[in-house]
Structure formats: C-alpha cells, structure tokens
C-alpha cells in the first residue's frame, strides 16, 4: 500500500466494505464517544470502527459480532491525530525519536524537511530509508528541498534537476521547498522556477521562506508559484498573506515563539475565517518540546479565543487539505488512517490516549508503544569515521573581519581588533576563535566571533547546517582537546575548558543526530544551554546559533564552505583555505 500515491490493493478496500457488511469483524471499536466532525465543525456522538490502520465506519451502529474489541469512550472526546506541517527532524534528535515523542502527545503525522538526507545519503539510500519509516506507527511525509540554505563548494552535487525531480516524484514527498533561495528566483533563476512548476504540476504545494517580505514581493512570489509561507512575524503580515491566497503557517518555535502574539493580532483584526491557517513548531530544539508539539499550539489557540473546531482543524484538517491528504489524514471519517486522540474535555487538547495507524501509542496517560528498534547502520547512518586530524597549524587566524552575534541568529560583520595570534584570547573581551572545517578535512575557514562566549575554552560541534565542524573558543589547546573527543565519539558536541572536558553530547547518527530517547536528549540540551550561559552565551537558543552560522537565508554575514560570505551581496569576502 502506498500512502501518498493512495494505490491501495483491491483486497484491502474489499475488506473495509466487508466490515460494513458484517462478514469481517473490525479490530477495534471506540464506542459512545463524542468526536469532532471537522467537515461540519460539530461535536457528534458516534461509534468508530477500525480495521488494522483504517477507520471504516463512523455512526450510531455497533458491530453485530459480540466478540469485537469494544472500548467504551463515554464521556470522552475524540479528535483527529495532530499534524505538524513543517518539521525539521534533525535538531539534535532524529526523525524516529522525534516522531515517537510527538506521538505520545498526540502529533501522529509529521511533514518533514529532507535537507539532511541530501548531505548524509545518496538518493538510493535515502529512498530506502523513507520506505522503512513507513513501518512505524507514525505517519511520516517529506519535502523536496530546492536549495541548501548555505553556500556550498559544489551546490550542483547536491541540488540538481535529476535529484530534485526524483525527490518530487516520490509518493512520500508532499511539497517542494521550503524556498530559502527565493532571492535567486526573483533575479531570474529559471531552473528554480522549473522545479517549482514541476511541483505544482504534480499537485504538490511549494513552501516559501519570506520573512519581512513586502506586499510587492509576496505578490511576485505568488505569481511565481509559491503556495504557502510560515514566516509571518506579526498578525498584519499573516493577514496580508491570507488575502493574497497563501496558506499561512503560524509559527511557535524555540527561536520564534510567536503564536500567542500572532493570534492576538489576527483576532483583534476581526478575522473569523481560519480554514487557510495552520500552526507549526518549525523545528524547535529538544527542550522546547518538553510538553509536546501541536498539542501546545492548540492549547494556545484555544486560550486566545479561536473557536474550538477551528483550533483543532488548524492542526489537522486544514493541514491535510493543504497537502491533498484529506482523504487519508486530518479527519475522523471512513477510509481515513486511524490517527485518533482521545481527550477528557473538548477544551483540553492534551490526549489521555493516542491511536496512530490503529496502534495504541498511549493508553490512559501511559505510553504503551514499545521502543522502536531501528537499524540506522543498514541505511548508511553511522558514527563519523574521521581519518584526518586537526593541528595547531590549522589554528592560524589572520582575517580582519569577524562575526558579531546580535541575537540567536542575526550576525553582523565587525573589524577584529583583538590579537588572534595568541593561543588564548583573554577573558577581558567577548571575542573568540571561530573555525569551520570540512567534514572530510579538505578546507577550513578561520575568523573570530564576538558575543558567543567571554571565557569558554572551546566548543566543537559536528552538528551544523552542512555537517561540517564548528569550533568556537578562547583557547586553541582546548579547541584541539574538544576536537579530539568529538573524533573519538564519532560526532557530537563537546565543551572543554582549561584542559578538561566539561560536557559531551554524542551525535553518533551521521554526526548530527542523537541515537537515544528524547527525554535523555532534553536533559542533555538543558545541561548544555546552562553551561554555555555560565560561560557567557547571552541569548536563548545556542543550538540554532550553531546551526545557522552557515545559513545564508539570514542577514548579514555567514561563515560557509566557500568562505566568509556577505549575504546581501552574495559575495565571498575571504575564501576558504585548502588544508
């Protein structure tokens, strides 16, 4: 069975019909519950019959066969499983650990970024991996990225017409984008436009990335084929997108927890139509998910006064409708995948019990789904094997321009005035060494960063936009020490200070992802953030700071594979050095 091509075998369909005829017994019946009909926006009393992973009946009747497994849901409220429409499943966690954790809190479907697979796997292995994910109770779908959101040494190797169209044609890929290279599109990049039009021809929306865009720019992007955008930072910006025909994702992420403000301003403007609104956590870092994903967004929407049916639809029906999946997701109706959340009250979106593809993920507040054993190595996702070394010769700094960290992710250039020829930069200033090193050891970029730490010896991370190594610190010896430990771990984030390792987070899945449970990862991230704060990090989200050091969709200067880049001019100020 193909979940997004929807080419079911006739035998399965005939079995569903046979349940209604009484010749096949449903596997599970949720009886006497009150469910949200997202088509009529009504709460209705019904019995819901389920066979394997599908809902086959919703109505007043019970099966005639008295041996059916009937669960009495009297006094409970049933809503469709929640959908995260814009997930980045590589923010230290991996797609499976995120999906398992999300499922416990009722988010049973994830629409995922494929960016990391472009860097970690060849296309054939990536396709095999996506197929393996289908065996999970959670429903996993993907985007097809059109650009790397950084400046690669060989963009064509990763983003070319053959590979992009291959992704777009995959039945589990449901959209193109997100489109961080939209300035290139406006400048006349017809290859990018061709990819977008192919996505549209296949009936798949194109997600934009348009922070601060004017009405003129939004109109141009709509004409060029962008379908949706999640970058509105004010209610006015969200409404502007709605009026131009965009599907609008309202963001509530660790880096931009904007949803309460957005909803306040949208409601104050008198907006009563919510069908083209969704909500997204946009790749929150692990600790941001401590209490769940879309359940938190729905709770905020309810608290702000969004009508109950619309609050739930914004995390279910509206998303499925946008992606052309409403015949299979986002509703409680015959033929739909049995993703159902059972609540103790209409106004409480935190589920008591969760069904994903007809399998219990949670029952009466207790997790019942066994741990998923997944053979990552079989798919080519293994610890890093590094056959080269970093030395003091690599820690020679002479570039006059550094990166000045203004907040979590906005970086301005500044003239380096401190003496970077020293082995240790004094604690009397906020400058630190910054080194970006090729994962394969072929090149490096040396500069300085101001505002990340005023005293930490070193932080070395294999977690980054492209999987290259980020090294930051006041002490060159500590940088080499932390580097050596990252190498021994096969990838990770390591802090060293005054000749000692003070923190390590192994990221043994390709150097970017933690191979373990989300609860353990959340604790480690909280520890890491606390240590970095103690050593002078002044902002809220160091994980995104590390990730976006190379991200060219943000102003004003970045350190990339090509070198130090002026984002606005798309000009390399100082090129990478071959080692």
Image (cartoon, rainbow, N blue to C red):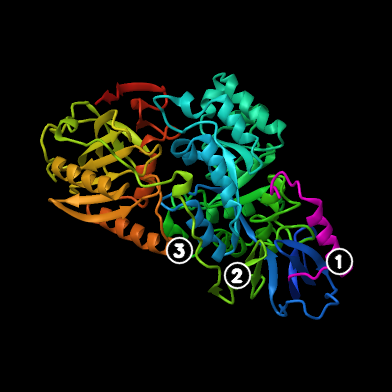
Residue 559 relative to residue 300: left or right: left
Residue nearest the observer in this picture, 23 or 496: 23
Q: Nearer the viewer, mark 1 or mark 3?
A: 1
Q: CA distance from mark 1 to mark 3?
A: 41 Å
Q: CA distance from mark 2 to mark 3?
A: 15 Å
Q: Nearer the viewer, mark 2 or mark 1?
A: 1
Residue nearest the observer in this picture, 316 or 213: 316
Secondary structure under tag 2 reads loop
For the C terminus, the quadrant is: top left
Which residues are drawn in magenta? 1-27
Which residue position is annotated with label 1? 20
Query: Decide: marks 2, 3 in contact (CB < 8 A)?
Result: no
Residue 126 relative to residue 488: left or right: right
Does 91 lie within the magenta span? no
Secondary structure under tag 1 reads helix
Q: Which mark is residue 290?
A: 3
Residue 94 relative to residue 112: left or right: left
Visible in this render: residue 520?
yes
- Residue for point 69% across, 65% down: 79
Q: Position of residue 332 (x, y in %)?
A: 74, 62
Does 19 lie within the magenta span? yes
Q: Which comes before the other along the chain, label 1 or label 3?
A: 1
- Residue for point 54% across, 25% down: 160
Which residue position is annotated with label 2? 351
Secondary structure under tag 3 reads loop
């Amino acid at each position: 069975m193909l979940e997004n091509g929807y080419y079911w075998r006739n035998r399965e369909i005939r079995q569903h019909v046979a349940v209604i005829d009484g010749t096949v017994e449903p596997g599970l019946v949720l009886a006497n519950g009150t469910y949200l009909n997202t088509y009529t926006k009504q709460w209705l009393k019904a019995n819901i019959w389920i066979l394997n992973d599908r809902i086959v009946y919703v109505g007043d009747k019970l099966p005639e066969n008295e041996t059916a497994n009937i669960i009495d849901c009297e006094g409970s409220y049933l809503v469709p499983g929640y959908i995260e429409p814009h997930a980045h499943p590589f923010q230290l966690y991996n797609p499976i650990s995120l999906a398992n954790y999300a499922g416990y809190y009722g988010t049973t479907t994830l629409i995922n970024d494929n960016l990391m697979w472009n860097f970690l796997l060849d296309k054939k292995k990536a396709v095999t991996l996506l197929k393996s994910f289908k065996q999970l109770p959670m429903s996993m779908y993907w985007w097809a990225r059109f650009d790397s959101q950084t400046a690669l040494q060989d963009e064509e190797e990763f983003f070319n017409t053959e590979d992009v169209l291959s992704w777009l044609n995959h039945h589990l890929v449901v959209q193109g984008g997100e489109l961080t290279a939209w300035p290139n599109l406006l400048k006349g990049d017809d290859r990018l436009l061709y990819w977008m039009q192919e996505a549209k021809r296949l009936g798949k929306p194109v997600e934009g990335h348009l922070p601060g865009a004017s009405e003129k720019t939004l109109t141009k992007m709509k004409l060029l084929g962008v379908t949706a955008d999640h970058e509105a930072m004010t209610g006015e910006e969200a409404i502007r997108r709605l009026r131009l025909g965009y599907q609008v994702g309202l963001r509530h992420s660790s880096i931009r927890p904007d949803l309460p403000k957005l909803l306040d301003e949208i409601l104050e403007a008198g907006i009563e139509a919510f069908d083209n609104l969704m909500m997204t956590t946009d790749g929150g870092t692990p600790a941001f998910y401590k209490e769940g994903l879309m359940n938190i967004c729905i709770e905020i929407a309810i608290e702000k006064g969004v009508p109950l049916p619309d609050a739930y639809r914004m995390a279910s029906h509206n998303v499925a409708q946008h992606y052309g999946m409403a015949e299979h997701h986002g509703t409680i109706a015959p033929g739909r995948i049995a993703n159902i959340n059972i609540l103790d009250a209409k106004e409480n979106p935190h589920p008591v019990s969760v069904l994903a593809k007809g399998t219990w993920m949670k029952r009466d507040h207790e997790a019942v789904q066994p741990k998923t054993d997944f053979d990552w190595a079989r798919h080519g996702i293994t610890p890093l094997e590094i056959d080269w070394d970093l030395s003091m010769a690599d820690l020679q700094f002479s570039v006059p321009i550094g990166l000045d960290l203004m907040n979590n992710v906005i970086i301005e250039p500044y003239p380096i005035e401190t003496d970077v020829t020293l082995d240790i930069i004094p604690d009397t200033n906020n400058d630190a060494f910054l080194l970006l090193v090729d994962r394969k050891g072929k090149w490096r970029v040396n500069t300085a960063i101001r505002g990340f730490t005023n005293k930490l010896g070193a932080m070395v991370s294999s977690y980054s936009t492209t999987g290259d190594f980020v090294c930051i610190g006041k002490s060159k010896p500590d940088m080499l020490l932390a580097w050596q430990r990252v190498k021994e771990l096969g990838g990770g984030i390591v802090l060293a200070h005054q000749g000692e390792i003070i923190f390590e987070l192994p990221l043994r899945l390709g150097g970017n992802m933690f191979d373990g449970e989300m609860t353990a990862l959340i604790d480690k991230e909280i520890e890491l953030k606390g240590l970095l704060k103690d050593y002078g990090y002044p902002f809220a989200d160091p994980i995104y700071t590390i990730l976006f050091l190379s991200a060219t969709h943000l102003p004003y200067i970045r350190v990339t594979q090509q070198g130090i880049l002026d984002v606005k001019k798309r000009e390399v100020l100082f090129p990478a050095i071959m080692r």
